[in-house]
Amino acid sequence: MDSGAIRRRVALGMAVLAASGLLTLAMPGSAHAASYCSGHKVRTLTFASGSVQVYKNRGYVCAVTFPKSGGARKWMSVSVQARGNRPVVNAGRFLHHAGPITVHAGHRCVWIKGAVGSSKVSSGWILC
């Protein structure tokens, strides 16, 4: 194999590696949430500085809050409350996401809340 063929193969390998890295960085929050929560996505709650992805699987509800922009640590929170129970909360200064939180809701309604910085969202009773 001549040196030109080797260079072409190395260049092709580097291009594939760079493209896969860019795709990973450009993935929306829902693709990341799927790796944290099982089941199917039932709702996306968007707000000014982020979004909350909500998944459901066999009576369990899972939620994760993602910021719109990455970078430094930000104050984030996610909360899931099944009707008749207390809310389960994950809050703090995180880099990538708050949560995941999984709660057994059965056939009960749930109330989802999420926040990034001072911007927040509240769903009201949903998924009844």
Image (cartoon, rainbow, N blue to C red):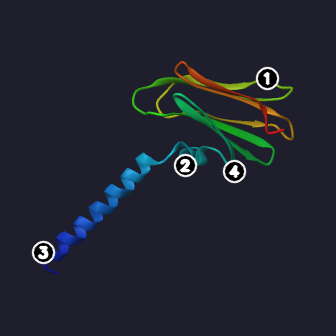
Q: Which mark lies nearer to you, 3 or 2?
A: 2
**Residue 109 pos. (x, y %):** 83, 34
Is 118 positioned to the left or the right of 102 in the image? left
* Number of the label disc, if any, that sits on residue 40: 4
Is 52 positioned to the left or the right of 88 in the image? left
At horizontal 47% and vertical 24% (from top left) the residue drawn is 74
Q: Could you tell me if the residues under marks 4 and 3 are in contact, i.e. CB atoms within 8 Å?
A: no
How many C-alpha atoms fall within 10 Å of the one at disc 3: few (<14), some, or many (≥20)?
A: few
Farthest top residue?
A: 118
Q: Which mark lies nearer to you, 1 or 4?
A: 4
Q: Earlier in the sequence, mark 1 or mark 3?
A: 3
Question: What is the secondary structure assignment of the residue under circle 4?
Answer: strand
Q: Earlier in the sequence, mark 4 or mark 3?
A: 3
Q: Earlier in the sequence, mark 1 or mark 4?
A: 4
Question: What is the secondary structure assignment of the residue under circle 3?
Answer: helix
* Number of the label disc, if any, that sits on residue 3: 3
Q: Which mark lies nearer to you, 1 or 2?
A: 2
